[in-house]
Image (tube, rainbow, N blue to C red):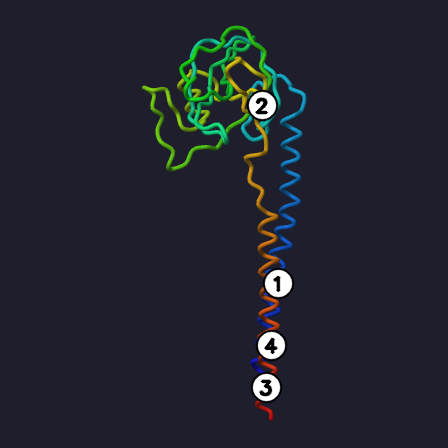
Amino acid sequence: MRSFLFLTVFGVAGLALLAALGVWQVQRLSWKQGVLAEIDARVNAEPVALPASPDPRADRFLAVAVTGTMPPGEIRVLVSRKMIGAGYRIIAPFVTDTGRRILIDRGFVPVAQGAAARATGPMRIVGNLHWPDEIDAFTPAPDRGANIWFARDVAMLAGELGTEPVLVVARSRTDPGVTPLRVDTAGIPNDHLAYAVTWFGLALVWGAMTGYFLWRSRARNRSDAK
C-alpha cells in the first residue's frame, strides 16, 4: 500500500511539474511573439531623423533617414548567406548634411566582388539603427592587412573609420552591386513552441508510465493478498 501511495504522489508531482513547464513555455511563446511583432513594427515604420544621441537600447531598430555624402573607404565583414555562400558586409563611413560622421552597413557583396569600386558621393539612405551583438570569445581578431573583419563591433568599426559609434543598416540600395541586408526578426530565435511540445510530450510519457507502474503495483498487491 505504501509503495502504491508513493508511486501515486511521485507520479502526480512529476506530471504536474512537466505540464507546468509546458504551460510556461506557451506563455513565453506569446510574450516572444509580441516582442517580435513590436520589433517588426519598429523596423518597418516611417523613418525619422537621426537622433542627436542615439541610445543603444532605446533606439535599437529605429527607422531613420540620413542625407549626406558617402566618402571613399570601407571595411569588409566576412559573412555567409544561405544558398549564396560567403561574402562581405560592406561597412562605410557617411557624413551627414549636419556634419556628423556615422557608419553605414551598405549590405552584401560576394567574395569575388569584395575589392570592387562602389558608389560614393551624395546620397539619401533609409535604414535602421542597430548595435549587433556578434562578438564572443571565439571571434578572430580582424585581419587589417586584408581588410577582413569577422563581426560588426560598432565601437571597433567606429574607431577604425573615425566615426561616431552609430550604425545604420541600410534598407535602401546605395550601390547597384550591393544587396541591402536589412534588419529583420528572422535571426532572432523563437523556440518556445518546440520547448512547449517537448515538455507536454514528456508529461504524456510520464503520465503513461505512472499509470503503468500503478497498475503493476495494484496487480502485485492483489496477487500477494491471495
Along the polypeptide, which appears first: circle 2 or circle 3?
Answer: 2
Which label number is shown at residue 128?
2
Percent of width and height locating residue 162: 42, 15
Q: Quick one: label 4, few (<14), some, or many (20+) residues within 10 Å?
A: some
Relative to 135, say whether 32 is above or below.
below
Along the polypeptide, which appears first: circle 4 or circle 3?
Answer: 4
Q: With 19 as the anchor, is 161 left or right in this view?
A: left
Name the residue beneath numbered marker 1: 204
Marks 4/1: CA–CA distance: 15 Å
Q: Quick one: label 3, few (<14), some, or many (20+) residues within 10 Å?
A: some
Percent of width and height locating residue 73: 42, 12
Which label number is shown at residue 214?
4
- Residue in the foreground of this view, choosing between 5 and 219: 219
Q: Quick one: label 2, few (<14), some, or many (20+) residues within 10 Å?
A: many
**Of helix, strand and loop, which one carries label 3?**
helix
Which label number is shown at residue 221?
3
Which residue type carries mark 4? Answer: Leu
Q: With 222 as the anchor, is 154 left or right in this view?
A: left
